[in-house]
Amino acid sequence: MKKSPTRLFFVLIGLTAFLTPLRSIESLPARPATVSPAKPNILVFLCDDLSTRDVTCYGATDVRTPQATALAAQGLVFDRAFVASPTCAPSRAALLTGLYPQRNGAMANHTYKRDDVASLPPVLNALGYQTAAFGKVAHGPKDVARHGFTYAPSGNNEFDSADIAEWLAHRDRSKPVALFAGTHSPHVPWPKNDGYDPAQLTLRRFHYDTPEFRADRARYCTAVTQADTDFGTVWAMVRRELGPDTIIVFTSDNGAQFPFSKGSLYDEGIRMPLIISWPGHFPAGVRTAAQVSWLDLLPTLIDVVGGTVPAGLDGRSFAPVLANPVTLHRDRIFTQHNNDARANVYPIRSVRTERWKYIRNLHPDWVHSNHSDRFRRDGAASYFPAWEAAAVRDPLAALLLNRYRQRPAEELYDLAADPDEINNLAADSRDATTLVELRAELDTWMKAQGDTGQVKVAPWLPGEPGLVDPDGK
């Protein structure tokens, strides 16, 4: 499908309409993403279930994220960064291998890459880096060991800044550091509300407004601020211990555990915050509209510090974007989701261009859910019974709930006109050419990936009770 300059112009205008503006990039001269004679240190900080629109520099006006805002002021903000899959384990396995889930083996949540699949941290090891992982970097303590970090605390998946401080104090000072740190926030269960007024929160168009939902969203916002605080703590340590010659990366693995976010292929589930800073080397306080994937992040870091990116990856370096933010990168973003144990057995595939999103629901006869709304654990989906009760009396609530649970075989969205992906155009004859082209592109990609679309876990079928298995197995 051809893209005209006019189409791209209006897509970029649409994107900037809802984003907090930073300094314009028009006057910046193009310059190479230079490599220091001595390799820079690296900090990659990963949040857990953080939606992009809940970060201040991405337009949030009701959530406190001062540390991410400070990084945005001295770094490059990516407005269109996407994960390969919208749940924790497959998203992180794709990050650490540079391969789509179909190729690395981690297709479902709570699964891991195959033993015969190489990871990318050892490439940094070979470049002389000490690679360390703290907190939730891979999906669990045992999974971290699979990826070849030179150091990781055993049996610890929780964020502990004291562990990081101790390791930094006793590191080998003759070698550069590639530090990966992951907070568990704002993953469920959300903590008690701390300082947020539920009545003042801004809700998405596709969420139903109830007091219960606002109360849970206030708890989520509290967890978002905790994630931002955790980042600030590690960032301050790095500045103190490693100095200014450090590449800083702030991002998240998938969207929040709300309907139409985590576990879905809507932008709310797959478009992630990504802020990258290297003072004196990368542009500061600017934004880029380049489409990049989490698959690309480690190949980019390897490239920037002077390494050779391994052949055969799905990920590829976006170092040219770091040198000149007006540079484009990917014209297509492909994503997939299979299941989260028994909680969300709903295989989906998608392809996204600058303007269009095509989604294929492989089993539209199955019921869509997520872990929280199916098993109703405290601090996760306390609002959902109120949504179901509202659906009995309010047609709007019924429409939203039905759209969440039951989906058509194909969905097509004009992202420039409809960024919330509300109006499905798959049946609109005026967009039939776009539908056919993207359908064919997704077919080609799935075939190239060896993706049969099969899921081995039993689905949730219409008419079955929602609380089949409270352990989610």
Image (cartoon, rainbow, N blue to C red):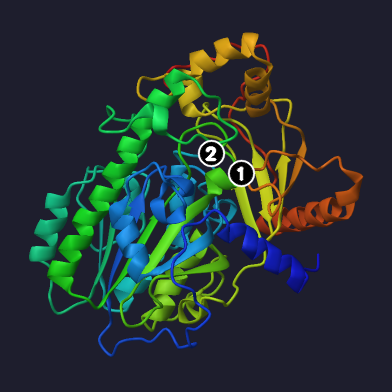
Is 60 left or right of 387, judged from the image as shown? left
Q: Is residue 134 left or right of residue 82?
A: left
Q: Tell me, yes or no, if residue 148 can be seen here.
A: no
The percent position of residue 5, horizontal first and vertical second, equals 74, 73
Pick whichever, 136 or 402, lies toward us: 402
257 over 165 or under it: above or below: above
Name the residue tied to disc 1: 266
Residue 261: assigned label: 2
Q: Residue furthest right?
A: 429
Mark number, residue 64: none
Query: With 85 as the anchor, is 129 left or right in this view?
Result: left
Residue at the spot 45% in from the left edge and 23% down from the top edge: 213
Q: CA distance from mark 2 to mark 1?
A: 7 Å
**Residue density around tag 2, few if under 14, some if 14–19, many if 20 or more, within 10 Å:** many
Q: Give coordinates of residue 65: x percent, y percent.
A: 32, 50
SS for dot 2: loop
Q: Are marks 2 and 1 in contact (CB under 8 Å)?
A: yes
Q: Nearer the viewer, residue 381 or 300?
A: 381
Say few, some or many: other residues with alpha carbon within 10 Å of mark 1 (under 14 / 14 to 19 / 20 or more). many
Judging depth in this view, the residue of 112 and 273 nearest the camera is: 273
* Residue 472 percent coordinates (x, y): 46, 24
Tell me which corner region of the image, top left, top right, bottom left or bottom right, holds residue 445: bottom right
Q: Amino acid at mark 2?
A: Ser
